[in-house]
Image (cartoon, grey):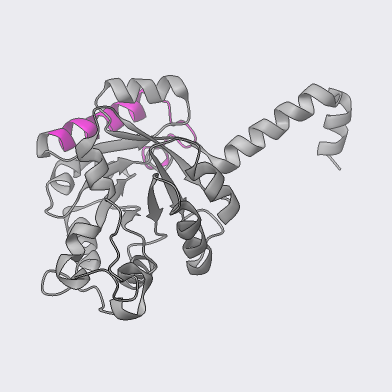
Amino acid sequence: MPFRLTPTFRDALGRADRPLAGIWVCSGSPLVAEICAGAGLDWLLIDMEHSPNGIESVLAQLQAAAATPVTTMVRVPTADPVVIKQVLDLGAQNLLVPMVSSVAEAEAVVRAVHYPPRGIRGVGSALARSARWNRVDDYLAEAEQHVSLVVQIETAAGVDAAAGIAAVDGIDGVFVGPSDLAASMGLLGQQSHPDVVAAVRRVFADARSAGTPAGANAFDPALARGYAEAGADFLLVGADVALLARGSEALAAAWVPEADRTTRAGY
């Protein structure tokens, strides 16, 4: 039976008339991914870089989210072509690749997501969920239509190279990671520092000049709104684990005296 894949993040950006709001899924739980996928946000990001996620758990989360209209992206832990190949074969249609700081690195990532002759992606679609085990008509010939690629700029060198990175053919978006960017700028833990904010906005401007969508991570609502006003096309505005941590802390604060909570914190 022929199978039709869902539109990509590139397609969602092309249809949008406002910044797309998304959430990190870092718990490694398919159940939590399903809850987040059905919340009404535009997109969710399953993280493999800083979260307890491997191939099997990412697969389960992709399957859990597939029942909803949310657009799902996977952040791979590295630009390694083998890892990229595996995640694509799981059926991930949208990838975020971290720590891209040069045009050469961006070009290498583009090659990793495309089949020959354009790229180096290994051909195994008949055995993989990506082509639904050959149930997607003409998957190999039309694979470019089914995959979108966003690269993450999170170093001072990446900011300097942003215009060139955004102009690389095959890059569908650039995403700024303020945490590592702040560290790269000697401002560890200061994501809202004026210099970091200015650098993020500089990437937006350079991406816009190349005609490429740009986004950023911003859990602070005021900062996120500021980035939206500065031209961000997509944002990550929260995370499953952060919501659970802050929500459970608020519950404890409402029901457990502070002295008892302080005592327990020290075991």
Above or below — where is 59 with respect to 21? below
Q: Nearer the viewer, residue 260 or 58?
A: 58
Image quarter where the C terminus lies is: top right
| Residue located at (86% from left, 23% from top) | 257
Q: Is residue 84 visible?
A: yes
Above or below — where is 101 with respect to 21? below
Q: Is residue 28 visible?
A: no
Residue 121 appears at what percent x and percent y?
24, 73
Q: Residue 181 vs residue 30: left or right?
A: left
Q: Indicate yes or no whether the magenta region holds residue 128.
A: no
Count the marks: how many?
0
Q: Main secondary structure of the magenta part?
A: helix
| Residue located at (30% from left, 65% from top) | 3
Q: Nearer the viewer, residue 239 or 15?
A: 15
Above or below — where is 105 with respect to 217? below
Q: Nearer the viewer, residue 154 or 115?
A: 115
| Residue located at (24% from left, 65% from top) | 113
Q: Residue 169 vs residue 59: left or right?
A: left
- Give the magenta-colored segment's residue range: 183-208
Image quarter where the N terminus lies is: bottom left
Q: Indicate yes or no whether the magenta region holds residue 185.
A: yes
